[in-house]
């Protein structure tokens, strides 16, 4: 036996697991397919790493079993994440909506905390090591991997699969966890890109493309949930935080509703202007709330050059519908190339919520994005990965 455990994947979950195991005096070996550990951490939050969220609770996660994450989140809290990084010189700074980023530091520093601690604890990280096969043995697991042109094997009594999800294949994302799970008869909740831009094709395509680069504060909703944040028009459709959030709840063929003026009533605003300033053009009124280019584009639906006093009842109804109930039927999404996370994954029914051990394969643990727990945009997914790393380390 080369170590107490082998961890496949030196990403957020695997690295935290290795470090927490180090505190407990356990020796692990991390096998990482990429040429460096924490590749996704490095690109996260635009290189700044939104490493947790002050408001994280079970409310901001999608899973077939909403209760599954409670145990992990009790064992490792947001406060634990904050104080862990503070211990190693990284103070958190809230950007917006509870999103915590390193103050004056970046994603490189976050990864640096883990690599230095792994070094101090003697936890070995083997990079350029793509795991190809796992065999169960009488006393644990035998893990085969390719390193350069050579194939090698390591053995350990415990095994952690923390190989992440399918997004960004060009960075080395693999379906390793899903393939292994399928091979061993574990159930998988259907996977799909999440936190992903949505595409618009057909007759409306040009209207959206012409607005590319414009951003509008909106409330985006479907029959399950709503998000109040910016949407961003792009050459191929819609992006921006509100769209990424709703994409995790969107299913092909469904429409989403966009309220282009949340928390206000456009008709009330018009009525107010009518009292003192009836000659005001509708376009001038809307320009107070939108970039001019967006107001101009609304001219496709609205009588922008009419004075507010002259608007008819029917026109007011059209304005109300267009501004507060703007319906969009996306053609699709931008796929795993542009998704931030994967929805679905290994069915939580297969795992113990307390330890993340696989019920049917003792000694094997799954953690992080490969499990059917998907967080909102805003630091939630790292909180899940750190919590999983901690929990698994207590049990290997
Ligand atoms: C562009 C982008 C920005 C993001 N920004 C944020 C953010 O700011 N905040 C946030 O909370 N979340 C963010 N996320 C999501 C976050 O990165 C993931 O949820 C998180 O990294 C998942 O951790 P993990 O350990 O499960 O997987 P990962 O961090 O993806 O690690 C899995 C590792 O396993 C390795 N691996 C895969 N297969 C094998 C194999 N066969 N053998 C060996 N190694 C293998 C991979 O190379 C990878 O390094 C972002 C994601 C993307 C794509």
Image: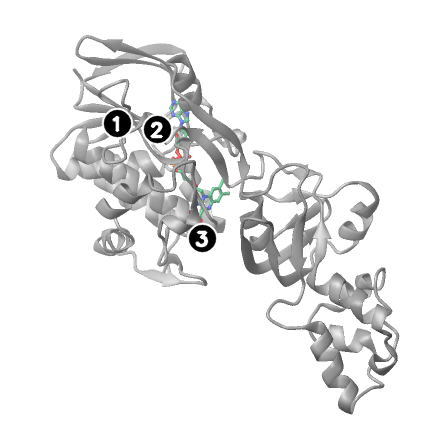
Label 1, label 2: how far apart the Cα atoms are: 11 Å
Image quadrant holding the N terminus, namely top left
Residue at 33 percent across and 38 percent down: it is 68
Q: In this view, does 383 lie to the left or right of 301?
A: left
Residue at 39 percent across and 57 percent down: it is 101
Label 1, label 3: how far apart the Cα atoms are: 27 Å
Q: Measured along the vertical axis of the image, is residue 93 above or below residue 376? A: below
Where is residue 347? Give x, y as percent.
39, 28
Where is residue 74? Give x, y as percent.
24, 47
Where is residue 171? Give x, y as percent.
49, 32
**How is the protein colored in the picture?**
one colour
Q: Quadrant of ligand 1?
A: top left
User: In the image shown, does 385 or 108 lie closer to the viewer?
Assistant: 385
Q: In this view, does 21 lie to the left or right of 32?
A: left
Q: In this view, does 292 lie to the left or right of 392?
A: right
Q: Measured along the vertical axis of the image, is residue 193 above or below residue 241? A: above
Where is residue 366? Give x, y as percent.
32, 28
Q: Can residue 122 be seen in this view?
A: no
Q: Mark 2 points at which residue?
A: 349
Q: Earlier in the sequence, mark 3 or mark 2?
A: 2
- Number of numbered discs present? 3
Q: Is mark 2 on a helix, strand or loop?
A: helix
Q: Name the residue under label 1.
A: 357
Q: Is mark 1 on a helix, strand or loop?
A: loop
Residue count near mark 1 (Cα–Cα under 10 Å), binned few <14, some 14–19, many ≥20: many
Q: Name the residue under label 3.
A: 378
* Residue placed furthest toward the bottom: 276
């Amino acid at each position: 036996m080369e170590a107490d455990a082998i961890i496949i994947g030196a990403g957020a979950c695997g690295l935290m697991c290795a470090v927490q195991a180090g505190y407990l005096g356990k020796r692990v070996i991390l096998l990482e397919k990429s040429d460096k550990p924490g590749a996704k951490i490095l690109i996260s939050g635009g290189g700044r790493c939104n490493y947790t969220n002050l408001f994280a609770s079970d409310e901001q996660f999608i899973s077939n079993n909403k209760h599954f994450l409670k145990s992990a989140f009790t064992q490792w809290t947001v406060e634990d994440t904050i104080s862990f990084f503070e211990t190693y010189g990284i103070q958190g700074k809230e950007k917006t909506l509870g999103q915590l980023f390193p103050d004056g530091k970046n994603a490189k520093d976050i990864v640096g905390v883990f690599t230095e601690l792994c070094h101090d604890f003697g936890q070995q990280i083997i990079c350029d090591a793509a795991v190809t096969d796992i065999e169960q043995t009488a006393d644990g697991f035998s893990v085969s991997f390719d390193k350069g042109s050579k194939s090698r094997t390591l053995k350990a009594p415990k095994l952690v699969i923390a190989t992440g999800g399918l997004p960004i294949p060009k960075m080395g994302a693999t379906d390793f966890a899903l393939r292994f799970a399928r091979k061993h008869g574990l159930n998988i909740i259907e996977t799909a890109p999440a936190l992903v831009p949505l595409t618009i094709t057909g007759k409306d395509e040009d209207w959206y493309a012409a607005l590319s680069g414009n951003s509008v504060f909106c409330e985006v909703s479907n029959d399950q949930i709503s998000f109040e944040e910016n949407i961003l028009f792009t050459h191929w459709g819609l992006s921006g935080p509100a769209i990424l959030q709703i994409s995790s709840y969107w299913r092909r063929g469904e429409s989403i509703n966009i309220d282009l003026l949340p928390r206000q009533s456009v008709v009330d605003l018009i009525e107010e202007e009518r009292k003192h300033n009836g000659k005001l053009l509708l376009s001038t009124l809307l320009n107070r709330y939108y970039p001019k280019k967006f107001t101009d584009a609304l001219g496709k639906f609205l009588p922008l050059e009419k004075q507010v006093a002259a608007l008819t009842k029917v026109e007011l109804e059209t304005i109300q519908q267009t501004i507060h109930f703007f319906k969009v039927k996306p053609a699709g999404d931008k796929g795993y190339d542009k998704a931030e996370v994967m929805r679905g994954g290994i069915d939580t029914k297969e795992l113990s919520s307390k330890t993340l051990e696989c019920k049917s394969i003792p000694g094997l643990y799954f953690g992080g994005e490969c499990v059917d727990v998907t967080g909102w945009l805003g630091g939630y997914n790292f909180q899940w990965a750190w919590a999983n790393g901690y929990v698994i380390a207590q049990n290997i």
